[in-house]
Image (cartoon, rainbow, N blue to C red):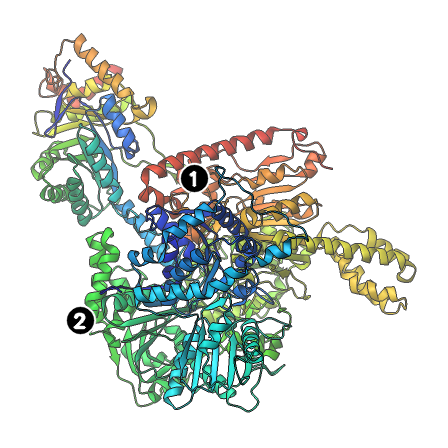
Amino acid sequence: MKDHPAVITLDANEATAFVAYRVNEVCAIYPITPSSPMAEFCDEWANKGITNIWGNIPEVIEMQHEGGAAGAVHGALQAGSMTTTFTASQGLMLMLPNFYKIAGELTPTVIHVAARSLAAQALSIFGDHSDVMAARTTGMALLASASVQEAHDLAIIAQAATLESRIPFIHFFDGFRTSHEVNKITLMDEETIRTMIDDALVHAHRQRALNPEHPFIRGTAQNPDVYFQGRETVNRYYDDTPAIVQKAMDTYATLSGRQYDLFTYTGAPDADRVVIIMGSGGETATETAKELIRQGEPVGVIQVRLYRPFSKTHLLQALPASTRAIAVLDRTKEPGAGGEPLYLDVLGAISEAVMEGKMRVLPRIIGGRYGLSSKEFTPAMVKTIFDELGQANPKNHFTIGIHDDVTHTSLEVDPAFSLDESKWTQALFYGLGADGTVGANKNSIKIIGENTDLYAQGYFVYDSKKSGARTVSHLRFGTAPIRAPYLIRTADFIGCHQFSFLENVEMIHQLKPGGTLLINAPFDMDDTWKHIPGEVQEALLAKKARVFLIDANAVARDTGMGNRINTIMQTCFFAISGVLPREEAIDHIKKAIEKTYFKKGPSVIRKNFEAVDQTLENLFELTLPTGSTNQRQVGTILPVGAPAFVREVTVRMLAGHGDDLPVSMLPVDGTYPSGTTKWEKRNVADLIPVWDDELCIQCGNCSFVCPHSVIRSKYYHNDHLVGAPEGFKSAQINARGYPETRFTLDVYLEDCTGCNLCVEACPVTDPENRDRRAINLEEKAPLLESGRVHLQFFEQIPLNDRTRVNYDTVHGVQFLEPLFEFSGACAGCGETPYIKVLTQLFGDRLVVANATGCSSIYGGNLPTTPWSVNKDGRGPAWSNSLFEDNAEFGLGMRVSADKLRDTARQLVSQLQEDIGVHLSHDLLEADQRNEVEIALQRARVADLQERLISIQDPRARSLASLADHLVDRSVWLVGGDGWAYDIGSSGLDHVLASGRNVNVLVLDTEVYSNTGGQMSKATPTAATAKFAAGGKKVGKKDLALQAISYGNVYVAQVAMGANPQQTLLAFREAEAYDGPSLILAYSHCIAHGIDMTKGLTQQELAVKSGYWPLLRYHPDLRKAGHRPFVLDAPRPTIQLKDYAYNELRYKILTRTQPAEAERLMSLAQEIADLRWRTYEEMAGYDASSFAPMG
Amino acid sequence: MDLRTTYMGLELSSPIVVSACPLSENLENILHMEDAGAGAVVLFSLFEEQIRREDALMDSVLESTTNIHPEASGYFPDFDDYHVGSEAYLDLIRQAKARVDIPIIGSLNGISNEGWIDYARQMEQAGADGIEMNIFFIPADVGISTKDVESRYLDIVRIVRKTVSIPVAVKLNPYFSTMGTMAADLRDAGADALVLFNRFYQPDIDIERLRLVSDLQYSVANEIRLPLLWIAILHGRVPVSLAATTGVQTADEVVKYLLAGADVAMTASSLYKHGIDYLDQMNKDLALWMERHQFATIDAFKGVMSQKNIADPTAYERANYIKILEGQK
């Protein structure tokens, strides 16, 4: 053991990757939450030239999906490299086939997993053991870590054990709770790693590898004669593994001083009740057991580390002989099973022991589920379980942490119980994602954890929105290691970084009596108290809280920090929390500033120092009055007119009370109502667009590009203005011959994110003020009340009749109701305008298969969904299956719709005498090419349903259930480039080749946006991305040309910011074409590193530079003998770099590797030129130059 | 033929110098320029404003994309080795100085006193042989006085002069009302050389879209007249090195400038048109001209056509203008 081990604060992803990187030669990677950072670290370290313990830089290669990563791992292992990968959840599922192979061939490797829920009734990115439990049958060993330190330590233990045992390992820890918890750990040094890894075993691995110098074959096909025996050959390896793992643990203990066991028992030697548990919950259970023992209760906890191979012997050794009752806790659910896996394993082991006479008495063994999808698991829950074990007839197959009022599995928890928290300083920080609160807190943890003897822990909770997201940082500091993997419920210190959060009284309830509240208040001292809601005032007075105020935004402004308040709020925390002596803390902050901004020069450092000093001068303690002075209570979400489900369920989730919802209130099959974002009114923007009715030319551009569908237009008869509230704006319609028709453009100001795209899209400039457009951003606060009233009036003006709107123009489309509204996507998102237009055009007959990714998150992450319905209750029918299968999923929808439509048509034919020949004929023969025809068909279907009621033939019932299918459905497959270019590419290719009438919309951001900007095959040459830190070397895949090569696929490449009219045309042509269609839509993204208010300008520049040529290939033109390939953009007028270098993703490389940046930019220009030339030539080809259609 | 000349105290092998332009962003190009016979290279301009803007963009992008969502702690690769501020520029100076023998002159465009001081010092420390101050200031405020404009220039020169000990040149615009006095004042403020003239941003207007159009137009040979005039006037009158920098397309313009009294002639657009190798051609053509006119050294003919040295000094004054007009009648 070293005298002075390095201590460091980091999360388990980094702690694990630190080890994995050093003991491997190949990493085959693919991003998936919450494991992505492990792969990202390895890629970064490789780029920086950091070497493994053998002195070489591991080869890090990104694959197209986890199945590909597993295949590459398998191959690299067979070829003799030390190889690893990192994954979670669905990614692990894609790896399962290879795991059987890798294990079957006794191949040493360690796969590191941040364990996460599997998508069932819904996807969840959060942590539980559903994924690793699904891998328990593969033959992989399963080793569980419970904390950041353990993840670091067991990573090397697993590596040592796999080499000796030849059994491949899955080393896992709890997603988010452990993978993302920042904690202070002791870092192992290189010597320890070297000692743990026996090079002779590495050489033996290489010796077993494929080698043409002494060839053999592996991976044979076997027949009934030998397969079974072959399967049994491995038994002794599994038998030996537990002892090998324990040996590695013991060796590691001598090196590190930290002893681990396969099953670690902590508790009373004479315990009568024992909890058996795996993962981070074990820490909670263990700490709770210690407290209960102090209170005199004979209890204990067995922490399971090696789950597979399951060593019954070691389990029995760990279990006290006095045990009378055992609760086995599984962080997974296996519907329909006799019990969850760990429970059954323990039950089997102990039953066998009793049967074999190794134990005299069979204890009572019960199993329970806890913590699914990172559901909190607290000391109070552990105590409840121990209490239950003390009952004469404890509940088996229980759940804990939820209220199951349907099958009554849940145990009732006394929330009052908690462990002694006085040994820690507990702090909560409420901030916005964009205000830097989380980053500052991570920095604070580093300052304290790495510069003092204190231990520190940080865990960060985000809501599911990408714009205006709220973050809550949970920080603990103490003198001993912090083993508390659960959220802070009561805090010594609360930082309220946005004044509006005081509307949430729950936050104040979390403050301990006598605790400290720091408020970022935009008012002076006297005024601040007046603005705090009465309930919050009362709570503060009752708690005798100390309240400190700072106008952080003013300090930031005055010191040239712009809107960055993070350093200021961090300084306040250190100044008043008492975690460190004030002077020492400030000194540390300044040192951190110097370190962070060293390269930016002395002026930036000076500016930050000034902010710190100014903070201290502007931080004041508020003297609390004796009583509450504000009658106003906290705001509540009570959406008037919302459906019952929204009022009873959604609203509770929105208020942060989703944990309290009982099982009975949730849908049984994951089905949720559409159109619920409209009840949120998130009010995330301070600036909102204001329409200038005099300047406006009513072109519709602003409404077309609005990512959040907050800009709406209507035309209407003068008469509708009767009763209009004061200030309601209305303009004469910009069309001749309609003197009595008015036009109004209104803004859903409470749903707006203030992204500025509308202003950017406005073609009008005020001749008297060149900075003004016909729509301009203005302060929302003074406009809020009148804006609400205006909107209410606007809403009661009838929607425009879809059959009377000109779909051909952007101007016309503004009058179509969007059925995708107010999503939580990033402010200024480049994707959502396309989706919105899709719903405006075809929303009431739209079926959407949505690949996992950004669009499925802002589209379908609870509590609400932006997919909406019209006044008739019709709207997009939306579903998400997986990331990898979206094309096939959508094709299935098409095939099904076609099949059921055909069946319905068949029944109409069969029943035509009863239905009426005329109606039957029209139902079967009428065209449905436009809105008028579709409206007529809907009327016929309604008529049909009426008539079917009185028809006795049983086939009439069948037809009634299918009649909806007589209205054509528009099936769209929507997803990002990660799906279309990578993980789903083979499926997409197959679907396009099917010839079926599906429409594919690829929202191309050119990286995996949802998981943090990793490279995809859509990433352009010369751009950097995660996994391409040195710049993408090869060209972007030309998906358009691939699709065009089939001949019968409609293909369009669009960029709304460059040519909205062409976008509109492409959507309409794609939908109208009776065959597969593919639209590639340029989607600017925060991952591009741009000023998001300039997203549309970048789109325009992308087209102008020739990088993103607008094009359409129409198979019907090919069929008619016309030129089918049309270029909709003029020749390039600017160089690629004039577009690209406005974006950080390109610019980075010019700073990190200037010569390489220049080389790649020149290559990228060459590629862009070549692509343009190719397209230009194709535009001149006649029909016969393209593949004929069958 | 001896093409050597002295410019702001630096010994150059040729009076043809590459002026500040994007060609020098690339080290290989700089090596090529030396091989082709450049007397010195003025590096492309380091724009304080651009650095600040880029840093601000990086800051705001990183701030607004870091730790905002549980699935993405950030959207970009690690930035540890990201060259912020002037680092890349300074690296280029260091690399160029390690690889070439000709002088490397940094070109700086500042917007704040802090910027001028910090970046000038950094360039000197990186090994630059001199600094060309690209003072890009359009007095668009119509209320600003002549004195204020002139003071601004002089203050900057004094600040930089105080900061560094290497030679400094000032790239001037032609719009001073008393160019001679201004040149002398700049010399007194510490300028070792004057570069005549800076071609300011001159926007065009797109009459269809009602937008300003800014594009780079290369200088043409007949644009040399204005700098030629002032070089001829200043030569020998103000004790300062003179560089000419507009319209140098061939050796002919080089000769003209030298005859007027320039120590060096700077070119960029000719290299864009003909490639870097064209420097060699220009040197050869210059040597041929000298041979034809029997000048063995640059000094032998430098300034012989300056106002001070010609027989009819008024040829450079208004009287000359009148004569020309009358000649056109």
Q: Name the residue furthest front.
A: A357
Say if A691 sits above or below A415 in the image.
above
Q: Name the residue furthest right.
A: A913
Q: Secondary structure at mark 1?
A: loop
Along the line of sight, the residue nearer the viewer: A64 or A1169: A64
For the residue carrying disc 1, how many other residues have a C-alpha within 10 Å: few (<14), some (14-19), or many (20+)?
some
Task: Identify the residue shown where x is 23% and y is 54%.
Answer: A598
Q: Which mark is residue A20?
A: none
Question: Residue A349: x percent and y percent?
Answer: 54, 75
Task: Identify the residue shown where x is 52% and y is 86%.
Answer: A412
Q: Secondary structure at mark 2?
A: helix
Residue ID for mark 2:
A583
Q: Amino acid at mark 1?
A: Lys
Q: Gap between marks 2 and 1, in whole Å?
A: 50 Å
Say if A661 sits above or below A1025 in the image.
below
The mark nearer the N terminus, 2 or 1, is 2
Question: Residue A1128: x percent and y percent?
Answer: 56, 38
Say if B152 sits above or below A732 in the image.
above
To which chain does the residue with label 2 belong?
A: A
To which chain does the residue with label 1 belong?
A: A
For the residue carrying disc 2, how many other residues have a C-alpha within 10 Å: few (<14), some (14-19), or many (20+)?
few
**In the displayed structure image, the side of residue A565 where residue A340 appears, left or right:** right
The reply to whether residue A1089 is visible in this rendering is no
Residue ID for mark 1:
A1033
Question: Residue B147: x percent and y percent?
Answer: 14, 43
Q: Quadrant of residue A293?
A: bottom left
